[in-house]
């Protein structure tokens, strides 16, 4: 079945440093979604990318969808302690399959 | 809208007992999903419904698990008999148009089977 690989598994950064997580699919995706889960919380939708090569920004967050629609990335500029949590990509072909997530820890 | 509502928030039960998890999706959402989250396996899709009909239950681990959606505002996930390896956080989510739209998650039910 469809698999979505996400790296890295963990990232520990100093506040103010940048952070990137990568998502790769074994198949072409119709779209990709990104979610954030705070510790002890539930996944919360961040954004959806649909078009090949699409780039979207939300304040300090930049999301990209690969040209082949098989990979995606989330980049956070100048991390803050409020960015702490696990970031998931979710591949949406015929059903929503979540990646393994990248847990972000930020040292104040 | 209060969002997706799950109950109970926490459940501790003994091995062999029946467990029923409940979910009320957001009104008007046609799709409902059940996910299980563990450290080892991450977020796994167990089953999803469209207009109260189960569409894909290939993620249901075994016959001990069953899910129903008797009407548009209520769904249950039942485990019988429960085993310690079923311990996890179970999330219910709903979305207005299925896979290509945002999924709204409930707070989850943390299940511990001892």
Image (spheres, rainbow, N blue to C red):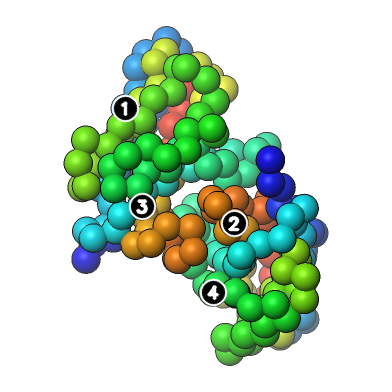
Q: In which quarter of the image is the C terminus of chain A?
A: bottom right
The disc at residue B108 is none
Question: Mark 1, residues whose alpha carbon is within 10 Å: few (<14), some, or many (≥20)?
Answer: some
Chain where mark 4 sits: A
Chain where mark 1 sits: B
Q: Is residue A6 left or right of residue B81?
A: right
Q: Quadrant of residue A102?
A: bottom right
Number of on-image labels: 4
**Residue B30 higher or lower than A75, as above or below:** above
Residue B24 percent coordinates (x, y): 25, 47
Q: Is residue A13 left or right of residue A46?
A: right
**Residue B72 higher or lower than A107, as above or below:** above
- Contact (CB < 8 A) between labels 3 and 4? no
Q: Alpha-carbon distance for marks 3 and 4?
A: 19 Å
The disc at residue A47 is 4
Residue B26 percent coordinates (x, y): 27, 58
Q: Report the mark closest to the observer, 4 or 1.
A: 4
Read off the residue under disc 3.
B31
Closer to the camera, A64 or B79?
A: A64
Q: In this view, does B96 lie to the left or right of A92?
A: left
Read off the residue under disc 1.
B20
Q: Alpha-carbon distance for marks 4 and 2?
A: 16 Å
Question: What secondary structure is marked by label 1?
Answer: strand
Closer to the camera, A41 or B73?
A: B73
Question: What secondary structure is marked by label 4?
Answer: strand
Question: What secondary structure is marked by label 3?
Answer: strand
Query: Residue at horizontal 37%, vertical 37%?
Result: B54
């Amino acid at each position: 079945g469809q698999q979505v690989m996400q790296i890295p598994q963990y990232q520990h950064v100093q506040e103010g440093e940048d952070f990137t997580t990568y998502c790769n699919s074994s198949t072409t995706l119709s779209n990709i979604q990104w979610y954030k889960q705070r510790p002890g919380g539930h996944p919360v939708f961040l954004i959806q990318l649909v078009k090949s090569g699409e780039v979207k920004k939300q304040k300090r967050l930049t999301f990209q969808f690969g040209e082949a629609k098989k990979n995606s990335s989330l980049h956070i500029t100048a991390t803050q302690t409020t960015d702490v949590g696990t970031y998931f990509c979710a591949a949406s072909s015929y059903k929503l399959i979540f990646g393994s997530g990248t847990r972000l820890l930020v040292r104040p | 809208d209060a969002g997706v509502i799950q109950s109970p928030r926490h459940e501790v039960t003994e091995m062999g007992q029946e467990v029923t998890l409940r979910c009320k999706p957001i009104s008007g959402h046609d799709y409902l999903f059940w996910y299980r989250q563990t450290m080892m396996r991450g977020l796994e899709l167990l089953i999803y419904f469209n207009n109260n009909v189960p569409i894909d239950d290939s993620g249901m681990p075994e016959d001990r698990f069953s899910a129903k959606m008797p009407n548009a505002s209520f769904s249950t996930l039942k485990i019988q008999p429960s085993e310690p390896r079923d311990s996890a956080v179970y999330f219910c989510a709903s979305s207005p148009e299925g896979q290509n739209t945002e999924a709204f998650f409930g707070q989850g039910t943390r299940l511990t089977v001892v």
